[in-house]
Image (tube, rainbow, N blue to C red):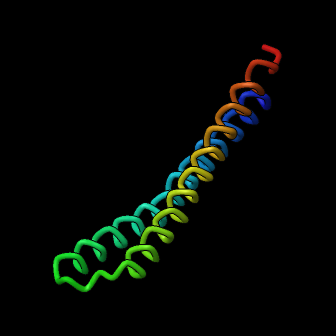
Amino acid sequence: MKNIRDEEIKRKASVKSCIDTLDDLNQPLNAINNYVEAGRHLLGRGYASEETLVDLFEKLSGQVSRCYELSRELQKAVHNKEKNERHIPK
């Protein structure tokens, strides 16, 4: 019974970790959306200099990199969980 409880606790912790990582993805995705909207606004008004656009693209690149990083963390966590589950004696 204790093993079942321990496994349930581990499973819930793993799911919570995945949910937290997905929540963390929202921040850079929102930032990307804001930078895109700002770029559209500036272009539409004729205020977008090359320097401004380069700055926006650099910020977008940084946020995309953060999304990739979080995605890799989530993949690694899922992979480790699957690996650990294969080694749990039944």
Quadrant hosting residue 72: top right
Quadrant hosting residue 37: bottom left
The one nearer the camera, 30 or 78, is: 30
- Which percent across, then down, holds residue 16? 59, 49
The one nearer the camera, 84 or 38, is: 38
The one nearer the camera, 15 or 8, is: 15
Which residue is located at x 54 percent, y 60 percent?
24
From the image, which quarter does the C terminus lie in? top right
Does 83 sit above or below residue 12?
Answer: above
From the image, which quarter does the N terminus lie in? top right
Which residue is located at x 25 percent, y 86 percent?
47
Left or right of 7: which side holds 26? left
- Which percent across, then down, holds residue 51? 42, 81
Which residue is located at x 38 percent, y 75 percent?
53
Quadrant hosting residue 45: bottom left
The one nearer the camera, 84 or 59, is: 59
Does 5 sit above or below residue 86?
Answer: below
- Which percent across, then down, holds residue 39? 30, 74
User: How many labels, in total?
Assistant: 0
- Which percent across, then down, holds residue 88? 80, 21
Residue lying at the far front in this picture: please name it: 50
Residue lying at the far left in this picture: please name it: 44
Which residue is located at x 24 percent, y 72 percent?
40
